[in-house]
Amino acid sequence: MLSKEMQDALNNQINNEYYASYTYLSMSAYCESISMKGFAFWLRRQSHEELEHALKLFDYVIDRDGKIVLKSIEPPQSKYSSLLKMFQQVHEHEKEVTSLINKLYEQAINEGDHATTVQLQWFIQEQVEEEKNAREIVDKLKFAGDSSSALIILDTEMANSSSQAPE
């Protein structure tokens, strides 16, 4: 059984994962609005992956006889000044999620909650990939600069990418 503190912390992380899903879906809609279908595709898949993360934690709390408490989700940003700035936000968000997962892991260790530490190890490994993917996209967008041709090539790459797009 989960401690009340761990249950609350996991419920907060579930909310964070839902917010991430909602944010990436909003970013996808923005990309659709500027005809960047490849970026939109990647972000929609990322939104779906964040939803899966939320549900993975959701099921875990239930499996541990915990109580789920869903909270409201703040509306995400819907306009961006550039793809680069948007993906810099993606990268910063993923670094923040890593920090939150690390804090949960530390809390589980401090509580001697071995089952939760094992569960969170998957999320820790996942965040390494999430940060790497976001950082690589930022790097490519920086390299592309204002080149329309380069952005179109990157957009096509994002649509066809299986190594960067979540499963």
Image (tube, rainbow, N blue to C red):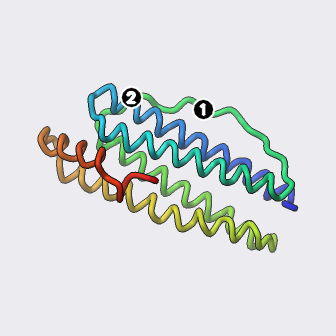
Q: Residues within 10 Å of mark 1 (few under 14, many from 20)?
A: few
What residue is shown at x 17% (from left), y 49% (from top)?
A: 144
Mark on residue 74? 1
Q: Earlier in the sequence, mark 2 or mark 1?
A: 1
What residue is shown at x 36% (from left), y 46% (from top)?
A: 87
Q: Nearer the viewer, residue 22 or 106?
A: 22
Find residue 88 and report its horizontal and vertical position in percent: 37, 48
Q: Residues within 10 Å of mark 2 (few under 14, many from 20)?
A: few
Find residue 16 and report its horizontal and vertical position in percent: 62, 46
From the viewer's perspective, is 167 left or right of 57? left
Q: Farthest residue toward the top?
A: 33
Alpha carbon distance from label 2 to label 1 = 15 Å
From the viewer's perspective, is 122 left or right of 128? right
From the viewer's perspective, is 12 left or right of 50? right
Mark on residue 79? 2
Q: Tag 1: residue type?
A: Glu
Q: What kind of element bears circle 2?
A: loop
What residue is shown at x 41% (from left), y 45% (from top)?
A: 89
Q: Tag 2: residue type?
A: Lys
